[in-house]
Amino acid sequence: MVRELHKNGIEVIMQFYFPPEIRQLYMLDVIKHWVMEYHIDGVRISGFHIPFRLLAEEPVLRNTKIWCSYLPNEDFPVISNPIFKNFISDNGNYRNDIRRFLKGDEGLLSQALGYHRCNPKEHGVVNYLADYDGFTLYDCVSYERKHNEANGEDNRDGADVNFTWNCGVEGDTRKKSIMDLRMKQIKNALSFVFLSQGIPFIYSGDEFASSRKGNNNCYCQDNETGWVNWKDNQFSREILAYTQFLIRLRKEHPILHMKDELLVMDSKGCGCPDISYHGIEAWRPDFGHISRMIGIVLCGQYAPGEEDASFYIACNMHWESHKLALPKLSRDEKWVKISDTSLSVDALPQNEWENRQEEGDDHVVTADCRSISVYMSKKCKETKSGKKERRSPARSQGKKDKSKER
């Protein structure tokens, strides 16, 4: 099976739980056995007394992904592998804090930006908002309470505190305003995960809004409750299309997944920091306790290799629309909106970036309530009439300049 998955470009990461009575050397032997005999690509380890140092010093596991919920600070010098960051941990309390930020809780903007930028040199970090041991992403915007009655434990199992918001109605509803808000919130969640600098992780089925009807502990549900619900309706198709768009965007632009953590400073002396923050006025962000909106600029000049496009991410988790300032680009560049979580899937670019015609104002943009929109810098070139014509950066355009071939 592993061999066939590899033929189709799919890596295999096995999950292991080790109870307290298991010795560390036995843990190491088990993991080595699976790597050497079955050629799995990585392991996700949970349990007690994890042998971090033994795993780090084992040559057989040098190129094996090792994912733990945490990594001890004292072992960082040992497990550091500058060529291949094979040790991976959860990005702090990313799941709970970003869930709270997305539903509009106060005092979380600075923490959210820290999670967004986090990308340590010593090891990788995984960013996710839903996993097997909790709500699916759709249930995060549809239920505020767990509904585990079907598990036969009087709804006492599973986490009681989930930091979720049902958008006004608990569970299923046909009310259009509620469903539109849920779709926007799912897109916001996916946007934050894929636009964060760490490793994006989405739970199977979240890419098309699979639901477990509020059950956040499906360990005993080998039935329709625990299975992935392969829905095919307009709601799920739109979420799937938006997920595909985010994956393509992240793959095409290295500035969205840098090797090392961004420094929030102009380390190249090019006149712009690698990442910067903006508010109602450019270069003047509001990190106050009640602030729920921010503009994030990722400067494409810091991308490795060929210069990338720059990106402006307008993030507004307030329940009211707000204006955000756009920092100025060079004279031959212009901001162009390429996505907005408040727009339908038909408004997204499907094949060419040029499908989007809406341009950002030179000074300000309007961030819709509870939305994340993305603007990309595009070059302009002079036409014979003297007017400037928009064109995509070479990395996104993917076309040859026919004028140079003549």
Image (cartoon, rainbow, N blue to C red):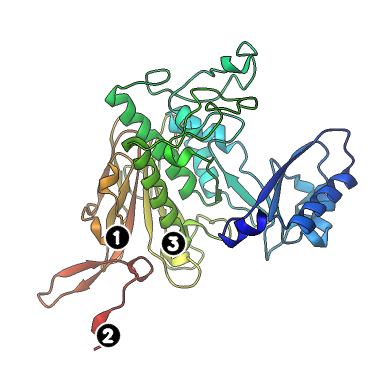
Distance CA(mark 1)–CA(mark 3):
13 Å
Q: Which residue is mark 1?
A: 353
- Among the two numbered marks 2 and 3 on one chain, the one whose residue lies closer to the N terminus: 3
Q: Residue furthest top?
A: 154
Residue ID for mark 3: 253
Residue 141 marker: none
Q: Residues within 10 Å of mark 1 (few under 14, many from 20)?
A: some
Q: Is residue 120 left or right of residue 248?
A: right
Indicate which disc, 1 or 3, sits on the residue closer to the N terminus. Answer: 3
359 up-or-down from 19: above or below: below
Q: Position of residue 104 (x, y in %)?
A: 42, 29
Measure how far apart labels 2 and 3 are at the Cα level: 25 Å
Query: Residue 341 location, x and y as percent?
Result: 33, 41
Q: Earlier in the sequence, mark 2 or mark 1?
A: 1
Left or right side of 83 for 116: left
State the image quarter where residue 122 is shown.
bottom right
Which x, y percent locates residue 270?
Answer: 43, 68
10 Å neighbourhood of mark 3: few (<14), some, or many (≥20)? some
Q: Amino acid at mark 2?
A: Lys
Q: Is residue 259 above or below residue 242?
A: below
* Whole-number angstrom distance, CA of label 2 to CA of label 1: 22 Å
Measuring from the top left, give residue 62's x and y in whole percent.
Answer: 76, 61
Mark 3: which amino acid? His
- The residue identified by callout 2 is 404
Q: Is residue 255 visible?
A: yes
Task: Please name the amino acid that badge 1 sits on.
Answer: Trp
Q: Circle 2 — which element?
A: helix
Instruction: Please name which of the two marks, 1 or 3, marks the residue nearer to the observer.
Output: 1
Q: Nearer the viewer, residue 220 or 366?
A: 220
Q: Are marks 2 and 3 in contact (CB under 8 Å)?
A: no
Q: Nearer the viewer, residue 217 or 68?
A: 217
